[in-house]
Amino acid sequence: MLSEKMKIMIPTGLEARPVALLVQVASQYDSNIYVQYEEKRVNAKSIMGMMSLGLSAGEEVTVTANGDDEAEAMKHIEQYLSMPQKA
């Protein structure tokens, strides 16, 4: 299992479109992937779960991945969250 803190660099934060794209990134992997913000932990493959976090640009989350492709999943999620032009 891998766990890493990541900062959201998408200027608009995780609103509808960026969340949908993040869910697409996470869904490419077989690993279980979760995003935690404060005390709330949600499945990164769930649009409704991710939307419920209401994350803004600059906030820090903890991403956890567990499975055969966890390292690759973490790498691509971090790349997505740190790319400001993806908003």
Image (cartoon, rainbow, N blue to C red):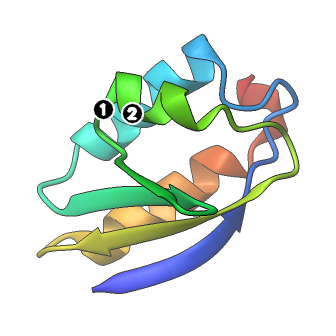
Give the alpha-carbon distance from disc 2 to disc 1, as whole Å.
5 Å
Q: Which residue is mark 2?
A: 49
Most extreme residue toward the top is 16
Nearest to the observer: residue 81 or residue 51: 51
> Tag 1: residue type?
Ser
Instruction: State whether residue 13 is above or below residue 6.
Output: above
Q: Which residue is mark 1?
A: 46
Question: Which residue is found at the position 71% from the left and 28% from the top?
Answer: 86
Instruction: Give the image location of residue 84, x and y in percent.
Output: 83, 37
Mark 2 element type: helix
Q: Kindly indicate whether the residue at mark 1 contacts the one at mark 2 (C-beta within 8 angstroms).
A: yes
Instruction: State whether residue 60 is above or below residue 58.
Output: below
Instruction: Give the image location of residue 67, x and y in percent.
Output: 14, 74
Neighbor class of circle 2 (other Cα within 10 Å; few <14, some 14-19, many 20+) is: some
Instruction: State whether residue 46 is above or below residue 64.
Output: above
Most extreme residue toward the bottom is 1
Nearest to the observer: residue 64 or residue 70: 64
Instruction: Give the image location of residue 41, x and y in percent.
Output: 42, 56
Q: Which mark is residue 4?
A: none
Screen quadrant of the N terminus: bottom left
